[in-house]
Image (cartoon, rainbow, N blue to C red):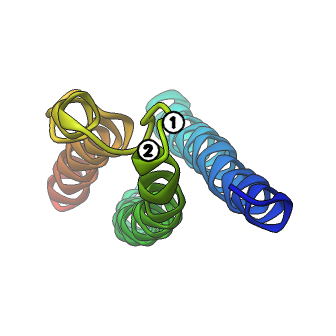
Amino acid sequence: MTDNERAMYTGVAICRNTEVTQRWARSQILLLIHSVMLSVILTRIPPTFLFLLGFSVGGLVLTVFWYLVNWRTNKWIVYWQSRLAAFEKSETNAGGTPVFTGPEWEKMTQSWFVFHRLVNYLIGLLAFVWVVVFIWAFSV
């Protein structure tokens, strides 16, 4: 790799790592918002129809937003990783060590136990909870 290619590789790696860090931060913030909303619902006695309806619709909208953010963030991470893999292929041919390519990388990234999939499971669980709250609103 030339010095310019190393600098470009470093820049792309920084972009990828920043996107991963932002995904963690976004997920933490959105989970905190959901936790606060659920805490408010469970501590309000007696809950009213409009109160539960408003929170349930807001929670469902927030889960859809979170899913879309998680999906788009993963697309960016995959993009940056593909750019790193392209740099890596030229270096691997020259005797370098693969990090973002190869069978181990494919095995790790295709597993069900990766962060964006686990977050999607959590989003699905929260969507179910908000649907239950929506139904609960009509029984109050």
Q: Nearer the viewer, residue 116 or 77?
A: 77
Could you tell me how many numbered marks the image carries? 2
Residue at 25 percent across and 39 percent down: it is 102
Residue at 38% in and 57% down: 52
Asked whether 128 or 94 is in front, the reply is: 94
Residue 19 placement, left or right of 10: left
Which of the pair 22/61 is nearer the observer? Answer: 22
Tell me if residue 57 can be seen: no
Would you place residue 85 above or below residue 72 in this image? above
Image coordinates of residue 24 in percent, x first then y, are 60, 40
The residue under label 2 is 92
Tell me the residue that label 1 is attached to: 96
Q: Residue at x 39, y 72 (%)?
A: 68
* Kind of residue at badge 2: Thr
State the CA–CA distance, disc 2 to disc 1. 4 Å
Of 66 and 9, the residue lying toward us: 9
| Residue 123 appears in the rendering | yes
Relative to 121, residue 53 above or below: below
- Secondary structure beneath label 2: helix
- Which quarter of the figure has residue 66? bottom left
Q: From the viewer's perspective, tell me whether residue 115 is left or right of residue 40.
A: left
Quarter holding the N terminus? bottom right
Q: Position of residue 27 (x, y in %)?
A: 55, 45
> x and y percent of residue 117 in the render?
25, 43
Residue type indicated by callout 1: Gly
Asked whether disc 2 touches disc 1, contact meaning CB atoms under 8 Å apart, the reply is yes
- State the residue at coordinates (54%, 31%): 39
Q: At numbered mark 1, what does the secondary structure look like: helix, strand or loop?
A: loop
Neighbours of disc 1 within 10 Å: few (<14), some (14-19), many (20+)? few
x%, y% of residue 65?
44, 71
The numbered disc on residue 112 is none
- The 10 Å Cα crowd at callout 2, few under 14, some 14 to 19, many 20 or more, is some
